[in-house]
Amino acid sequence: MERKKVTTTVLKEMKGKKEKITMLAAYDYPTARMIDEAAIEAILVGDSLGNVVLGHRDTLSVTMDEMIHHTKAVARGTKYALLVGDMPFLSYQASIEDAIRNAGRLVKEGQAEAVKVEGGRNVVDKVEAIIRAGIPVMGHLGLTPQWVHQFGGFKVRGKTETTARSIIEDAKVLEEAGVFSIVLECVPWQLAKMITESVSVPTIGIGAGPYCDGQVLVLHDLLGLSGQHIPKFVKRYTDMEGIVAKALANFREEVKSCKFPSIEHSYAMEDEELKKLLRHPFRARKSA
């Protein structure tokens, strides 16, 4: 059976059928291609590339040009999955004009099919404007990394009645604004369950428990390529860092011991051509 292209409408239909949605964050062509071939429904080019790929301590340093560069690379490896590009810090907060222009750049230059915006009531005017411009928007509530300094660090959000109620209200506001889905990051599972049951759009959880309509992880976390420290919500499905370290050590040892490359990994001349060469061997010029 031929696979169909995943769209925002498909994700909404999946919620209605209670079919779980899978999404992974990727930042380049080869990983995007593998994710797409694995039938993951959505790929997020997250501004987490700042931490994961570029080596920053947070996401705040990521620029629009960097997001476009990586989104464009991911787009080349994506055929079926819905491609969502993250709106980086200060690409939409300052004005509606900035929000529309930068969302448009992610779609036009980066070839994204939707954008993700962090925040609720504080950014709803920008969300509505982007949607009016014809660009689908994925919301993002709970722990929103672009607001990390305001929150006082990377902490679970919605643990108190007051903060939980605020996140619920933000979710309803985003739903009314027209977002096609909402990422819920690092919130108690009870709160995520309440929001999932109270909004008509799919919720995608990351550190939000099992009751969301779907789940997203950073591919590098899933594969064990993100170092020793991993958040509680991450499950490592393999230890690629260990596998890669072993391969690198084997390569170094084989080169040092002259085991690699062997003739098996080398090109050869035809015997007749080699004989011609040997009849007139190369002589180095004497230095003046």
Image (cartoon, rainbow, N blue to C red):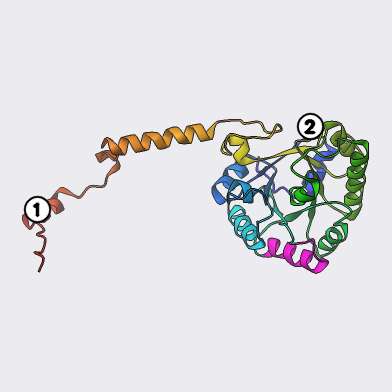
**Amino acid found under the numbered disc labelled 2:** Gly
Report whether 273 appears left or right of 179: left
Front-lying residue, 73 or 163: 163
Front-lying residue, 155 or 263: 155
Circle on res. 90:
none
Where residue 146 sits: x, y (%)? 74, 52
- Residue 84 falls within the magenta-colored stretch: no
Report whether 118 appears left or right of 61: right
Residue tagged 1? 278
Q: Is residue 272 visible?
A: yes
Q: Residue at x 79, y 61 (%)?
A: 93
Q: Residue at x 71, y 54 (%)?
A: 86
Residue tagged 2? 209
**Amino acid found under the numbered disc labelled 1:** Leu
Q: Residues within 10 Å of mark 1 (few under 14, many from 20)?
A: few
Q: Residue at x 42, y 35 (%)?
A: 247
Q: Is residue 171 above or below residue 70?
A: above
Q: Which residues are magenta?
A: 92-108
Lower position in the chain sequence, tag 2 or tag 1: 2
Q: Is residue 140 visible?
A: no
- Residue 104 falls within the magenta-colored stretch: yes
Spatial CA distance of label 2 from label 1 is: 72 Å
For the stretch drawn in magenta, what is the main secondary structure? Answer: helix
Q: Secondary structure at mark 1?
A: helix
